[in-house]
Amino acid sequence: MMCQAPQDAAPLVGWVIPAMLRSAKNNFWHLLAVLLVILPGCGAKIDLAAERHAKAVKALIDLGAEVRDVEDEVTHDRGTYVILFREHFTPEGRVQEEVLKLIREIQALFLGVINTHVSDDAMPDLALLPNLHVLNATATQLSNRGLKLISASRDLRLLKLNRTHITDEGLEFLREMPSLRLLYLGDTDLSVAALQHISKIPQLEAIKLTALPITDDELPNLSDMPRLRFLALDGTAVTDAGLKHLDSLPKLTYLDLQNTVVSLAAIKDFRTRHPQCFVKE
């Protein structure tokens, strides 16, 4: 009789939405970890990295972390989203050593440290994680120093820095990250000069600038970003006149203009010129 590994029936969805229940008994990785222990002789060639991954997921769940399979909504990259909570950090804001050892085993790691007391001092450890693809540091104390330290990551693709303490000067460190493709900077203290810094990262495919003091005058900087596909300008000061500067973005497929003064007539005209682009108004 041939032994078969169980298949995860739940489809992968946007990475901010759960794809599996947190309960261990319903968790695919928890089940897989058990099978890897009790079925060593079934003849299947089990990848050792996958085995370590599954056991790490089970251990992280046992420690109170939230773990789920996800798919990035822009790039469609798939990974394992591990959300840590305050109890997973030292008083100094570093990831506890036991937790750090476990997340090192996660393949295609999407790491969430949202609304925790994670500090800049934690960034060197995270930068060394071999499979770190996403870091969601929303609503943390991360500063320019932390950006400098995390910029040593060679594999990080998406960085969420909404509601952090970064400034324009810190954005310069992001140029040192060769794999960075998506950058979320909403509700920070960045100035109108932020786009000048961001435009120096030409490989970016998505940027979210919610509630930043961006005006029409800064939008020409986007012409240096030919790969840009996702642009969120919601809550900024852009107007009808600024939309013409987006004509230089041939790959743009998503534009968020919520909570701006851009008129419906200007949006309609933009859609005519860019039928491939979905505009959220």
Image (cartoon, rainbow, N blue to C red):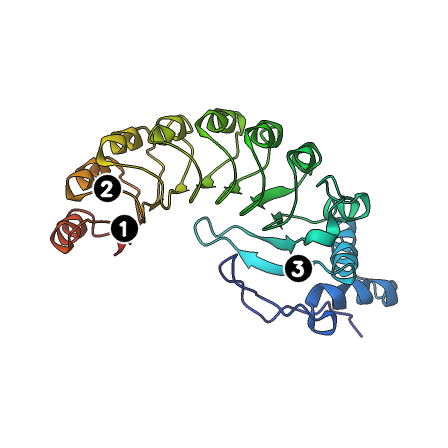
Q: What residue would you read off at disc 1? A: 257
Q: Give the number of callouts.
A: 3
Q: Position of residue 72 (x, y in %)?
A: 50, 53
Q: Position of residue 5 (x, y in %)?
A: 73, 67
Q: Which mark is residue 238?
A: 2
- Is residue 140 rendered to the left or right of residue 219? right
Q: Quadrant of residue 133?
A: top right
Mark whose residue sits in front, 2 or 3: 2
- Dot 1, crowdedness within 10 Å: few (<14), some or many (≥20)? many
Q: Are marks 3 and 1 in contact (CB under 8 Å)?
A: no
Q: Residue at x 20, y 52 (%)?
A: 275
Q: Are marks 2 and 1 in contact (CB under 8 Å)?
A: yes
Q: Are marks 2 and 3 in contact (CB under 8 Å)?
A: no
Q: Residue at x 38, y 30 (%)?
A: 194
Task: Give SS at disc 2.
Answer: loop
Task: Kindly report the distance in space between the C-alpha atoms of the residues bearing marks 2 and 3.
Answer: 38 Å
Q: Residue at x 75, y 68 (%)?
A: 31
Q: Quadrant of residue 258?
A: bottom left
Q: Residue at x 81, y 47 (%)?
A: 98
Task: Give SS at disc 1.
Answer: loop
Q: Is residue 247 above or below residue 25?
A: above
Task: Kindly report the distance in space between the C-alpha atoms of the residues bearing marks 2 and 1.
Answer: 9 Å
Q: Position of residue 236 (x, y in %)?
A: 30, 44
Q: Is residue 111 above or below residue 173?
A: below
Q: What residue would you read off at disc 3? A: 67
Q: Is residue 175 above or below residue 142?
A: above
Q: Give 109 or 42, whichever is nearer the viewer.
A: 109
Quarter in which the C terminus is drawn: bottom left
Q: Give 103 or 260, whichever is nearer the viewer.
A: 260
